[in-house]
Image: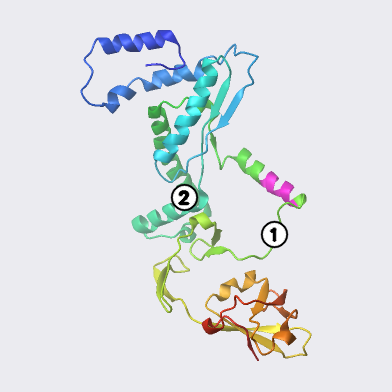
Amino acid sequence: MLNSCGRTLSWTVKRNLSRTSLPKSFDLDLVTSNYEEQTRRATVAHRNGASSSLPPLRIVLPPPNVTGRLHIGHALTVTIEDAIARQMRIKGGEATWLPGMDHAGIATQSVVERNLWRREKITRREMGRDEFVRRCEEFAGRNATVIRDQMARMGATLQWDSEYYTLDQRFSSAVTRAFVTLHGEGLISRDKRFVHWSPALRSSLSDQEVDKVDLPPGGLLSLPSPDGKGRREVKLGVMHTVRYELLGGGEGSFLLVATTRPETIYADVALAVHPSHPRVNELRGRRARNPMDGRELTIVVDEAVLVDKGTELGEQ
């Protein structure tokens, strides 16, 4: 068996194998029995007196979520980065490979809340913030121990003395500083936008955290109750008619828009009318007011409007 520790370890492993008969099938326990010592030696190899002709290598392991166990995707990433770090050490260079864990805020909160309700019939609001945060930290700590053991059994040559956690104060401060800096430079902004809002978590979710479900018109969707206790049935696909004030046409002039997704009105950027609309010349280029946030929207003419599907503007 070869690794970055050099010929001595390779010869020792071969000598040990020669004393026992090789198993007829793959034995995971036998293969990984001395990984801990091999990994320790490979990690410290060439740390001192590294070749000055090679630039130091710094790698940060993408932090796995503390909500579960490592899977084959994590194993692939660990294998590739481990090979890069070992190669640098074999060449006499310095390689620092930093491990870490991700708190996975929304996912961790969801798992802990489900466990609390299943085992103790209590919600995080009833428990209080401080106690709930402590429960989350306990949950993360238990899973982190399992993840470290998995990486050790894979033989990952990580610098565990430099392990980080994404909720550590120094990292939280760095994230805050980065967002403040980007906002100050005008690279990011805060505004009202259409988001995925979770009534149960009372937080917005990313696209990756949302499960898309197709329902027939008027179908019922089971959702968590706002108070976190039990569930409720919500009817979807209901047609709503919304009035948009037509600007520049006298007070009390409105356009009607029918939609089954009134929550998307916040994201409206324009209103469209089909070229066959009887008032197309009057409406073309006019502006209407968004009834939710007051923004002015341009009325455009587009053949993509499906008149027979109820997507065209009405009038009042």
Q: Taking 299 as reference, is 218 left or right?
A: left
For label 1, the residue is: 190
Decide: is 171 above or below 154: below
The residue carrying mark 2 is 108
Name which residue lies at 64% across and 65% down.
Answer: 193
Mark 2 element type: helix
Of the numbered discs 2 and 1, the one sitting upstream in the chain is 2
Q: Is residue 264 above or below residue 186?
A: below
Report x, y in % for residue 201.
Answer: 50, 60
What residue is at 56 percent from the left and 60 percent from the top?
204
Amino acid type of the residue tagged 1 in the rendering: Arg
**Magenta-span inclusion, residue 143:** no
> In this view of the protein, which residue sits in the foreground, 156 or 230?
156
Range of magenta residues = 176-183
In the image, is residue 7 above or below residue 109?
above
- Residue 28, horizontal then vertical, whole percent: 29, 27
Magenta-drawn stretch, dominant element (helix, strand or loop): helix
